[in-house]
Image: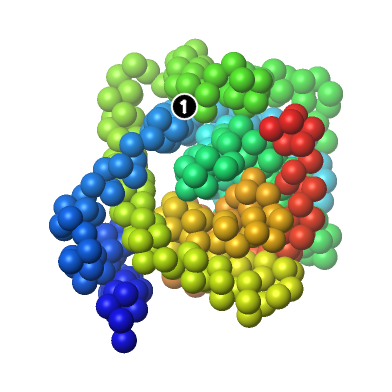
């Protein structure tokens, strides 16, 4: 057996063993990459190669958008924006059967889109909606299931940090602007699909309707939420129109959210130091994941793994639909034990050449891989969104699994539609010539 083959075996075996030992993902990636590099030490300048690759991996102007969008999301979560969005959503749909569940979905879509964070949406919306839904007879496990799955829409509807990461991993073949605009229809489709299943449950279980809001009430709640919703228009509209880059948009989002929260009166100047510290901690975790993931991604290229996988898939599965299904299945499995950021950075360089060789647009594939991994963060054993949503609802993960399964099937169904009907993702980028 060649040293290259041994190196690859050591890489994957050590990585999975470390994950099973519950070593944090970033450390698992870094240690596995280092062990594999040590077997190739005669071909490399030295062990410092991994440090160099980690450093150059985050030496990107586009990545500056991530800490600012994280900070903007934290400000929105604490600044009263979630409450205003919930009240506006409730005025629109609460009179339908199972109305509060619709409110949960719609508010998660709006807040997730504005904050760019599924975890922020699950925490902010779930903490408010779970108690309200329980008061009207909804089981807490159902509230958690709705909140967990609906929060993923914010990773597709821009602005989205993970789409920025994918743009980096794609090597510039997919622009941030094109990815942002491409995420709208898939994100909305996913939200409506979840609402469709909620409607089925509400009708079969005869959940109560809420009071129908008058036009003046809807207008009043819209007026209060207007400036929160306007942020989405400013950020995405500015990027698509070429007024500013995604990084510049993230800074504008922070300033806008900060001023809005101060005007609303839900935040004070004295709250910002603790907010900055919290955002810095989150940013540090994300950036360390990106560092180690970029090092492993480089090692994959050094070992020729993308070419080997591409050749294997193209030669063993000569039907492109079978290849797309196989890639989706692999990504679904990966998503159950790996966080989104390292998964995107590691597996985009592996699968992107395969799908582009079969005619899939890099922007389309970006939406497909993100939705795949959205399903993964809702599932055990690593699913961060599953644990956050369960924790907010104050129910155990094991209690949530059963009611969550139909929602996951809905997400997989939407994934298949988006995978095999590229127009869903590509209609808007084509329309805007991105």
Whether 339 is drawn above or below 409: the answer is above
Q: What residue is rendered at 62% in x and 40% in y?
A: 179
Label 1: few (<14), some or many (≥20) within 10 Å?
Answer: many
x, y (%) of residue 224? 65, 20
Q: What residue is rendered at 68% in x and 49% in y?
A: 361
x, y (%) of residue 74? 43, 33
Q: What residue is rendered at 65% in x and 25% in y?
A: 240
x, y (%) of residue 377? 51, 59
Secondary element type, mark 1 = helix
Closer to the camera in the image, 116 or 397: 116
Q: Quadrant of the N terminus?
A: bottom left
Residue 91 image-quadrant placement: top right
Residue topped by disc 1: 247
Q: Is residue 187 left or right of residue 62?
A: right
Q: Quadrant of the C terminus?
A: top right
Closer to the camera in the image, 323 or 181: 323
Which residue in the rendered view is the most extreme toward the front?
43
Q: What residue is rendered at 76% in x and 60% in y?
A: 420
Closer to the camera in the image, 415 or 11: 11
Whether 315 is drawn above or below 211: the answer is below
Q: Is residue 116 left or right of residue 86?
A: left
Residue 45 image-quadrant placement: bottom left
x, y (%) of residue 348? 51, 56
Q: Would you say residue 47 is visible in this rendering?
A: yes
Q: Is residue 399 left or right of residue 190?
A: left
Q: Would you say residue 89 is visible in this rendering?
A: no
């Amino acid at each position: 057996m060649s040293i290259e083959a041994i190196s690859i075996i050591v890489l994957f075996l050590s990585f999975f063993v470390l994950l099973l030992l519950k070593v944090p993902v970033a450390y698992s990636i870094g240690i596995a990459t280092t062990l594999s590099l040590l077997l190739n030490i005669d071909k490399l300048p030295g062990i410092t190669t991994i440090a160099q690759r980690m450093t150059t991996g985050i030496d990107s102007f586009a990545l500056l958008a991530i800490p600012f969008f994280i900070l903007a999301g934290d400000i929105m979560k604490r600044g009263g924006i979630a409450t205003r969005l919930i009240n506006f959503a409730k005025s629109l749909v609460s009179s339908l059967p199972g109305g509060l569940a619709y409110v949960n979905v719609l508010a998660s879509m709006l807040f997730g889109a504005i904050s760019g964070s599924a975890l922020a949406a699950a925490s902010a919306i779930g903490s408010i909606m779970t108690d309200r839904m329980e008061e009207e007879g909804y089981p807490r496990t159902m509230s958690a299931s709705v909140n967990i799955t609906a929060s993923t829409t914010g990773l597709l509807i821009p602005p989205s940090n993970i789409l920025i990461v994918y743009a980096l991993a794609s090597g510039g073949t997919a622009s941030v602007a094109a990815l942002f605009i491409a995420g709208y229809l898939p994100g909305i489709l996913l939200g409506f699909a979840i609402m469709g299943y909620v409607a089925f449950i509400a009708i079969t279980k005869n959940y109560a309707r809420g009071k129908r809001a008058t036009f003046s009430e809807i207008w009043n709640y819209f007026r209060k939420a207007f400036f929160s919703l306007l942020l989405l228009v400013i950020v995405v509209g500015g990027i698509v129109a070429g007024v500013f880059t995604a990084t510049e948009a993230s800074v504008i989002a922070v300033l806008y959210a900060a001023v809005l929260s101060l005007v609303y009166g839900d935040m004070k100047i004295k709250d910002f130091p603790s907010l900055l510290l919290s955002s810095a901690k989150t940013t540090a975790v994300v950036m360390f994941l990106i560092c180690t993931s970029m090092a492993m991604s480089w090692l994959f290229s050094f070992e020729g793994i993308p070419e080997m996988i591409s050749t294997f898939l193209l030669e063993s599965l000569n039907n492109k639909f079978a290849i797309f299904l196989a890639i989706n299945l692999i990504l679904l499995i990966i998503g159950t034990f790996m966080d989104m950021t390292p998964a995107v950075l590691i597996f985009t360089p592996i699968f992107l050449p395969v799908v582009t060789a079969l005619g899939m647009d890099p922007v389309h594939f970006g939406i497909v891989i993100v939705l795949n991994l959205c399903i993964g963060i809702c599932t055990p054993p690593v699913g961060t969104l599953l644990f956050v949503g369960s924790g907010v609802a104050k129910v155990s993960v094991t209690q949530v699994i059963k009611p969550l399964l139909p929602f996951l099937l809905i997400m997989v169904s939407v994934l298949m539609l988006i995978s095999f009907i590229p127009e869903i993702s590509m209609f808007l980028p084509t329309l805007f010539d991105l």
